[in-house]
Amino acid sequence: MATWSTPLPPNNVAPGQAGHATLHNQAANALAEIRAKHDAHEVAVNKYHRNLPSEQNLLAWTYDPGEAGHVTAQSSGGVAGRITLVRIMIRETITWSNIWFGLAGLDAGATLANCYMGVYDVTGTRRGVSADMSSLLMTGAVAKPIPLVTPFTAEPGEYFIAMLLNGTWTTNSLTFKASGAGISVNAGLSAGHLRYSNMLTGQTSLPVSLDLSAQLTSTINTGWASQWYGVS
């Protein structure tokens, strides 16, 4: 009498094991498909429900300028000589050439000198700095770019936009477009990574490096530092 046997699957895998392997592969493929659909959905949400810097010919920003519905104002005694820092996340490699802000109000009687914008990386190293922008703060209450003296390549990561103002002006006259967010913006963060902060006093230029662990929030409660910034 002939003897019949069930052929084994390739690689001598038993039938039961082959079935399990098939089910495992099917489950993995289904999971990969679900993840792909989720990622595509996220892209669609970001594309159609969020304004992007690229849609305004910018490379990055601290937040949508449409949300800058307030203005920040401080007395010259409050911020002159202090470095104000605003954190910005860069998510792809860019060539950083300009820092944009919205100049909301002018003070024709202001006396300004040694006013600068700059960029620091997360180590506190200055990566870029502007020329003295004092004259640019006296005209044109518009969104304006402040050129860096030397553009630089910014890899993805954490950066801090620095503003330094010096001189005298009338409180509530020299103002910048801002969100108005106060101290709660730093919730969950510690010095070295604060979104809004201030550092040092008596500065007439932006130092080549900062000790970011010494970040303070003494001028932030009023909403100062919530200025909108863009990058190009």
Image (spheres, grey):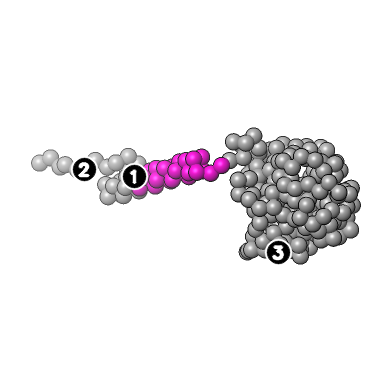
Q: Is residue 71 visible?
A: yes
Q: Amino acid at mark 3?
A: Asn
Which residue is label 1 attached to? Answer: 26
Return the residue nearer the eye: 194 or 174.
174
> Which one is closest to the eye, mark 2 or mark 1?
1
Instruction: Rate crowding at label 2 as few (under 14), some (14 to 19) or many (20 or more) other CA atoms within 10 Å.
Output: few
Choose the circle earlier in sequence order: 2 or 1. 2
Label 2 SS: loop
Rounded to the nearest angstrom, the CA distance separating label 2 from label 1 is 24 Å
Q: Is residue 28 magenta?
A: yes
Quadrant assignment, res 61: top right
* Position above or below: 45 against 222: above
As for residue 208 lying within the magenta part, the answer is no
Residue at (89% x, 49% y) in the render: 111
Q: Tell me which residue sits at (49%, 40%) in the image.
A: 48
Mark 2: which amino acid? Thr
Q: CA distance from mark 1 to mark 3?
A: 55 Å
Of the two numbered discs 1 and 3 on the same chain, state the one appearing first in sequence.
Answer: 1
| Residue 126 image point, x, y percent | 81, 48
Residue 6: mark in rendering: 2
| Position in image of residue 146 (x %, y %) | 77, 40
**Span highlighted in magenta in the image:** 27-51
